[in-house]
Image: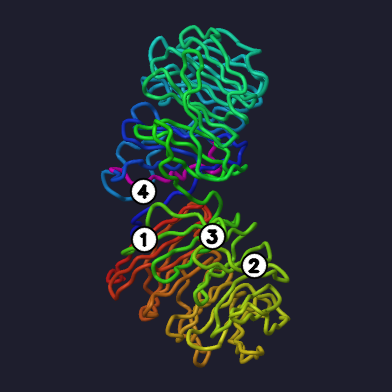
Amino acid sequence: MIRQTHLYPAAPSTTRGALTFISYDDINNRIAYAAGKSVVVTSLDKDPKFPPIQFTKHNVAVTAAAFCPSGNYVASGDESGNVKIWDTSVYGKEVTFEQPNVKSEFQVLSGPIKSIAWDAENSRVIAAGRGKVKFAHCFTWDSGNSIGEIQGHSETINAVAIKPQRPYRAATVGDDKAMIFFNGPPFKFTKSLRGYHTNSIRSVKFSPDGKWLASVGSDRIITLYDGTSGEYIEKHENAHEGGIFDVSWLPDLATFVTSSADNTIKKWEADGLKELETFILPVSKSVENQQVGVVVTKDYVLSLSLNGNLNFFTHAGSFSHSWYGHQRALTEISLIGGSKLLTGGSDGSIRSWDVSRGSLNAECNILDAVVHSNYITGIVEYGSSIVTSGWDDKLKVSKNDSLSTTIDLSGQPKAIKIVGNNLTVIFENKLEVFNDSFEKISSLDFEYVASDADAIAGSTTLLITNETNKRIEEYQIAQSIEHIRSYPELRSAPTLVRVSPDGTYAAVAESTGKYTLYSTVDANTVTTRWAFHSSRVNDAAWTLDSKYLVSGGLDCGLFIYSVARPVKVLKQQLAHQVAVSGLSWIDYNEDEGSFCSVGLDGMVKTWSVKFTSS
């Protein structure tokens, strides 16, 4: 059987208008945020009571997510205007990683949901954003009944907030530079306050006691209002050196923090809008370090950088640590030296994870020095160096996480492989060979389309997929490249080849997802019964003893095939939300093992498997 053991979540999405709100559950010390088509819920405790949740029941990109005050439910909205209410209260009693139950679902707007707010009774929800007829809708979470009208805006609403105690009040802010105040429920228009902001208003929040209401915007202005009447009190211009994205109140009721494009977080006293503290990241000032979100938690002030990093500060303002993750689809994975796992994304980013006893350190490291500007296509260990390739047409060589050499290629590399003492780069229509000084020593143009390759360990033999003629080509790699033979023709074009560690077998996946297992000695077929995938295979990995192959692809499934029992298979459907894109074994013995998978959903997952059940 295959069982998921841990989820290492993707970083929050920040690219859709650079406006991302992180929701905090103060009952269970958890945060929720949007990550692609998923919602991630993860604990901030050192010893979490609850495992991470990846909610995957949205069909399009998620744009907002918010806990109800009790922490039992999350309301999430997507770019199509759909809101789903789902249950987190029973999740965590048993670590199953199954999807939470959707309690209700409503189509509330015709455009993306930008912000969601709950009332203190966990019963009423306001979802706001962009639409053709209206910009917000207020409703009961269980029945969807309307509880008033949110009117007064002429452009997109960026944020909504509900006063956390009776008498309830609501406030919305948007691109029309207005703050609209509502009494309720049912919520009714009370007043429109304009002229206090000169540009888009990004966020609005009530203080925990409901006394104050603060709004911030791209104009670098903080405006303070009375939380009960909505009356303007005062404003602070040029509060930051850049636009302000978000605001969050501290538990002491009289202070709040703001996050800005100037890369800083600032703490303010509400009475008089006095600046108390500036929180500074220990990194260089840059666009990617703009602070686009902030939330106050039990132990930390948590900020979100534009590049997806989650930064932890103490309430006093000192920096503690950061969480890193991928914001884009993951495309490559490679185990280095048995103790380090490298993952690469479609945006060219690379992360490093420490491996121990079949699991990963939850806090990965970002390798800024090795980053590519585009899709990562290969990560290999070459001597004492790490070599990566990307669609920026470059090879990058690094040692000790520092870049040492960059090599310009003649085109987009499909894959990189170590053959004997040489490094080979496979392109769609040619092969290039480099020595350990990274000098090109030979090349060969193909008369066919190639997509993948793999080397036979302990030899100078390389197998390459020939999609044009539907077969595998075998080459001898040395100072020159020699074609040895062609394998028998397949049923459809081969897209992936993986050679077993002992060099005995070559597993070849076709475009349909079906495998043909060959003997590398005589190129004869061993079995064609590995046929459980329903679409293209993206990656596969052999166990060290060459007995099993784990495979993943576009059908989102994981399948473990056995050489000795080819008709038996261990499977896990819907392992990733979009597709499985990379696989690597991180622990193995004869009866059980652990492997890691990455997906186009940006998530990293670990799995345990017991082979005795096969």
Residue at mark 3: 344
Q: Which of pointers 1 and 4 indicates the residue nearer the eye?
A: 1
Q: Residue 62 at x, y = what percent? A: 53, 39
Residue 461 in view here = yes
> What segment is highlighted magenta in the picture?
49-63
Of the two numbered discs 1 and 2 on the same chain, state the one appearing first in sequence. Answer: 2
Q: Residue 373 at x, y = what percent? A: 64, 57
Amino acid found under the numbered disc labelled 1 = Trp
Instruction: Please say whether residue 123 is one of the residues in the magenta stretch.
Output: no
Q: Which of pointers 4 and 2 indicates the residue nearer the eye?
A: 2
Of the two numbered discs 4 and 2 on the same chain, state the one appearing first in sequence. Answer: 4
Q: Which of pointers 4 and 3 indicates the residue nearer the eye?
A: 3
Q: Do residues under tags 2 and 3 come within 8 Å of each other at their CB atoms? A: no
Instruction: Please say whether residue 56 is one of the residues in the magenta stretch.
Output: yes
Residue at mark 1: 607
Residue drawn 40% across the image and 77% down it: 566
Q: Tell me the distance, in whole angstroms, between the alpha carbons under discs 4 and 3.
A: 26 Å
Q: Residue 475 at x, y = what percent? A: 61, 87
Mark 2 element type: strand
Front-most of residues 301 and 2: 301
Q: Tell me the distance, in whole angstroms, between the alpha carbons under discs 1 and 4.
A: 14 Å
Amino acid found under the numbered disc labelled 4 = Glu
Of the two numbered discs 4 and 3 on the same chain, state the one appearing first in sequence. Answer: 4
Residue at mark 4: 98
Magenta-drawn stretch, dominant element (helix, strand or loop): loop
Q: Which of pointers 2 and 3 indicates the residue nearer the eye?
A: 2
Q: Residues within 10 Å of mark 3 (few under 14, many from 20)?
A: many
Quadrant where the C terminus sits is bottom left
Q: Tell me the distance, in whole angstroms, between the alpha carbons under discs 4 and 2.
A: 43 Å
